[in-house]
Structures are given as C-alpha cells and as structure tokens.
Amino acid sequence: MGMPGGTKPGTKTDPFDETGSMRKGDTVPLAATRRAGLVDQVIEQMRQAISSGEWPVGRRIPAEPELVTALGVGRNTVREAVRALAHAGLLEVRQGDGTFVRATSELSGAVRRLVDEELLDVLEVRRALEVEGARLAAIRRTDEDVRGLEELLDERNAAEARQNWPEMIERDTLFHLMVVQSSHNAVLAELHRGLTEVIRASVAVGVTDTPGGAKQISHDGLLEAIRGGDSERAAREASVFLDDLLERHAADRH
Amino acid sequence: MGMPGGTKPGTKTDPFDETGSMRKGDTVPLAATRRAGLVDQVIEQMRQAISSGEWPVGRRIPAEPELVTALGVGRNTVREAVRALAHAGLLEVRQGDGTFVRATSELSGAVRRLVDEELLDVLEVRRALEVEGARLAAIRRTDEDVRGLEELLDERNAAEARQNWPEMIERDTLFHLMVVQSSHNAVLAELHRGLTEVIRASVAVGVTDTPGGAKQISHDGLLEAIRGGDSERAAREASVFLDDLLERHAADRH
DNA sequence: GGACAAGTCCTGCTCTGACCACCCGATTGG
DNA sequence: CCAATCGGGTGGTCAGAGCAGGACTTGTCC
C-alpha cells in the first residue's frame, strides 16, 4: 500500500486503534487508552502522508475500498476523513475518476474561500507578509539562503534575456518564496505560500505585459539588502516592489 | 426548524435537489441540472446559517436526526457535512453532548493547525499583519473608526487607572483588533483575529506583569497617526509597540 | 436533607450492505 | 477507421444496526 509509516489501524503493529475490529463483544485483552475518534486518526494519517510528500500534489490517492482495507476501518470513516480534507482544500474528489492531492496545507483552501471578489485584500496581506519576511530574512538568512537567492535571480534574468516569460515568472515567484523562507519563520512562510498559490490561480495568465525595468532594480536591491543584513532597507525594497504590484493591479481593474 | 431560508433539500419548495427522493427508478419529469453534491449543498447551508448569525457562536446546532429530517437527506450526508465543518474549525463536536458553533470563519482553524510550538513565529506574523493594518488604517479609516478607537483607548486607560487588569487587557486587545479592522481589509482582519485568538490561548494568564509605561505612549501615538492619516507613522508606531512585545516574549522564555 | 450511585435518555461514532451516478477505457459494430 | 456501446471502477447517497460517551433523573443510603 502506501500509508504513512506502514502503520494501519486494525493491524497488530498499530499503536492505537484496538477498535476497528473490536466490535460486537470481542474480548480485547488490554487496549491503549485511545481518545481520538477513528476519523480524526485517519485524517491525521492522510495529512501526514500529504505533508511528508508520500502523496505528492497531483497524485491520485488509493480508492475508498483500498483505504478501507488498508486502514482497517469502515467506509464511512474513510469517507468522512476524505470529505474533511477535501473541504479543507487538501484533496480534490472527482466522482468516477478518483481523489487527488490538491495542496499541502489547509491555508490555501481557507483563503481561497475568502478570496472571491477580494483579490485586492489578499494582495495587501501578501504585501504585509513579504515585507516582514524580507525584514527578517535580512537578519536571519544563512549563507546558503543567499546563494540560493542569487542563483534564482540569475536564472530569472537569464530567462528574461531569452524572453522565456513563463520560465521567468516561475523563477521570479520562487525568488519571492525563498526570500520569505529565508526569514526562517515557518508560519510566515506557509501563509505566504498559501496566498501566492491563490493569487497565481486567480491571475493565471495575462501577466506577460511586464515593463520589467523597475522590477529588476527592486530585486537586485532586495537581494543586496538581505545579503548585507540591512533589515530596514530590505523591508523598504520589498515595499517598493509590492506597492508597484498593487498599483498595477489597481490599474488593471480600473 | 431553523434552517436558513427555510428551504430544505427534499422539499417541494426546494430549487435544487430532485435527488434526495429520486432514487430507485422514480420518474422525475424534468429535473434541474444539478451539479453540486448533496453534501456540499448541506455544507453551504450550514455555513450560511453560521455566517448569517442564525447560528451564533457557542450555540448548539440541531442534532443529527433533526437535521436529517429537516434537510431531507441521509444521516451520512449530514455527518459528512458536519465533519467537514468541524475539521475546518467552524463546528465543535462533543460526543454525548451535541455539536456547537465554534467560529465563523475557517481561517482560525487553519491557522491553529500551523501554530503548535511556534509562538514566536506567530507573533512575528502578527507583527506583519498589524503593521500593515495600521498603515492601511491611516489611509482608509472612517470617522466612525476613529471614534471607536478613541472610545476603546479611553476605556482601556480608565481600566488601567482602576487597576482592573483583566478589563484593561480586554480593551487593549479590542483596540488592536479595531486598528486592523479600520484597514477595511476583510482578509487581513480575519487573519489577524485568528492569530490573536491563538496567541491569547497560548499565553492565557500571566500577562499581568506589564510595565505599562512605554506601551501607553505607543497607543496614543498610533491613534494619533491613524487619525491624522499618516500611514508611515502609523506603521512605525505599530512596529515599535510590537517590537517591544516581541522583545518581552524573548526575555520571557530565555 | 444531602451525597452518592445507578439508571436512562439523548448525543454522536462506526460498521455494513445496498444501490445510484459518473467517468474512462475496451469492445464491438458499422 | 470511427463511433456507439458496454463494461468495470470510482465516488455519492441511503438505510439500519449496534457501540460509546455525557448529562440528567431517580433512588437509595448515610
């Protein structure tokens, strides 16, 4: 199968459970004092499989009957767990086709629900997170972070030179992501990632009309500030870029 | 009952459905081309009931059997819907007692899941949001916002004078909340609210050791900046206060 | 009278089995 | 060769049964 860690409720090797097959008056000698419901346990296992990368994004997860036997629980239990994760945005269920991994965090789903009609709000929040991320990155970045940022920026510029816009946008996005990650604040990075995901889904195409000039300068300056540990300047550089982006958004919808 | 709008799947007056009882070869003349699954419809109705205030926070929602008859769907369907909302943090299920409304937005729940063990990270994220919130509040605040802020600050100070610490902390928290709300960015406010909730749950007690001096100044300055529409200063004032808070946290844990 | 215990009812939890609706690929007919 | 058909597999929904936990009532005993 493919369940995380190979442990499955209903299996002898499993630390908890003792319930999946303990119905109808079975005499289980001495079970662990389990408190959480079965469904929550299944949810947790699936979340684990997803965030650990065992079930990568886009991958189809085992069908209901397989999960039932693999986990040793009833179909209802599996269904409720899947339903919960689907509503949270981690899974996508397609009747007649299968269930697929859609994201690795619940934030995207939660944010997505707020987004409709409020893209501007989301952009502003992203501004807040990215500015703070840049500020903290300048203080906490490792040498390795700096190397990674330089590399991404180089690749971005190379792609720009080749006029390979999709590639450039990809690298550009990754650069911003890595700036925030260099803050070494997991919550901040995760939130930012979720928001970026949603924004990219909303905007999708039509970003090829980049003037490109001012943008470029901002990026170099930002990198330099982070490299030099100048948190004030890093925050300012990030601000400039994002203000520019916000203005462009405002202009787009005019 | 108490279902939103009084419409229930399985009822003649219901616009969609046509499925709840259309099984086993019934001959429905010409049904609407419904696409959404029953569970999602139920989820939507419940979300509606919650966000519309029909089911206020803390209120107990109807028991499963009642929902089944009221909505005209199977118990499984109801359970899956409830489970999804419970996982999302909107509902809290207590076996043997009932199911209760816990929050009005999914964000808190999603954030809560990220937080464990990383209070510092959360505080930093809150800093990001609150600084940006203050900045935007200075630009977009209405006169009413300003009045509300003044009032809260007055009450806070009055409580402080009476040495009524719980009251003071309460008003203080509300003040910060309202600052962010004055940014008129729903997503930002919601995220900030979720984080504050989590932080308060983490910190809980033991906050009575407030020097109080520097804090006071920051608040007045922040209010003044927001009132005057000085976004730069508002952001700076908020920064100062939150840096102070972060430092105190760092000192606390050493 | 009050404290504790048992009983009971209501709540949610899990399992099972049946049937339906949908999608996709293979088969088969033209 | 293409298209209509028919499977098999997937998730969607329903119904009924028994299990498990909390809260309230009742009753007994001190």
Image: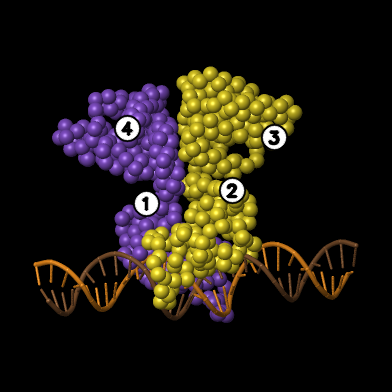
Chain colours: A purple, B yellow, C brown, D orange
Q: Which mark is residue A103?
A: 1
Give the percent coordinates (x, y) of residue A11. Answer: 44, 72
- Give the distance between the C-alpha atoms of the residues marked 2 and 3, in whole angstroms: 26 Å
Rounded to the nearest angstrom, the CA distance separating label 1 from label 3 is 42 Å
What's the mark number on residue B167? 3
Q: The disc numbered 1 marks a residue on which chain?
A: A
Left or right: residue A186 versus residue B141 is left
Q: Chain of mark 2?
A: B
Q: Helix, strand or loop at disc 3?
A: helix
| Residue A140 shows up from this direction | no
Please give the residue where the numbered disc 2 appears in the rendered image.
B53
How far is disc 4 from disc 3 in space, using C-alphas?
Answer: 46 Å
1 and 4 marks on the same chain? yes
Tag nearer the camera, 1 or 4: 4
Q: Name the kind of residue labelled 4 in the image.
A: Asp
**Same-chain status of marks 1 and 3:** no
Which residue lies at the image location 59% right of the left edge and 41% below the top edge? B200
Count neighbours of disc 3 (C-alpha within 10 A) and say few if under 14, some if 14 to 19, many if 20 or more: some
Q: Which residue is mark 4?
A: A252
In this rendered view, identify the residue nearer to me: B24 or B107: B24
Q: Amino acid at mark 2?
A: Gly
- Give the answer, above or below, for where B51 lies relative to C24: above
Q: What residue is rendered at 41% in x and 74% in y?
A: B27
Tell me residue A9's x, y (percent).
Answer: 46, 68
